[in-house]
Image (cartoon, grey):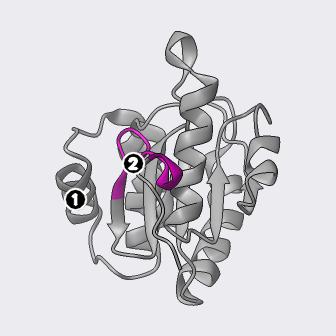
Amino acid sequence: MATKGKWAQGIRPRNFHWIIKDRLAVCERPGGYGDNHRRVRRQEEIIWIREQSFTTVISLIPAPHNLHNYDELGVAWRHRPFAATDDPHALLTKLYPELEELVGSSSKVLIHQEELGDRVCGLVAGFLLWNGLIDTGPRAIQVVEQITQRQMGPVGRELVTVALDL
């Protein structure tokens, strides 16, 4: 079997980080967001996701923009819109068991929103707390901050608090 060239392997999405090694990762939207979004970059990043054998991409972007690109490149996806105005309790009550099932079944899951910010970081920190991988909210926040190399603000911290209530 011939090895694939560099470009056939795609490019790693921006701000990609493993939260649980080889099981759960986060990144910004493939192709970037806003004025920085590029169609070719989106395609190359989705190719990278496919070539890394991710079994599911979970998009938290409120609108279904560009989700068809995953289908075109043979990548399974799920759309779980999470807008700033949405009730986090309602979403996390459904999303955490779904994530637990995916991660527990040896799937490789990638979660993204437009950017890698408080909402995604708080969501995954809350997941680590909710499923018992980490025992306290402050420790979950600290771990995700270290992994992503970004400080979590009030929106992310609030999601960790919501996870404690579930």
Q: Nearer the viewer, mark 1 or mark 2?
A: 2
Q: What span is colored magenta in the figure?
A: 7-17
Q: Is residue 15 above or below residue 89?
A: above
**Residue position marked by numbered label 2 in the rendering:** 121
Asked if residue 54 lies left or right of residue 22, the reply is right
Q: Quadrant of residue 107?
A: bottom right
In x, y percent, where is residue 96? Answer: 60, 69
Alpha-carbon distance for marks 1 and 2? 13 Å
Q: Quadrant of residue 137?
A: bottom left
Outermost residue toward the top in this view: 35
Residue name at image x 64 percent, y 25 percent: 39
Which circle's residue, 1 or 2, is located before the other in the chain? 2
Q: Which mark is residue 138?
A: 1
Task: Look at the numbered disc 1 and give the secondary structure of its residue.
Answer: helix
List x then y, in percent, for residue 132.
38, 82
Toward the viewer: 9 or 163? 9
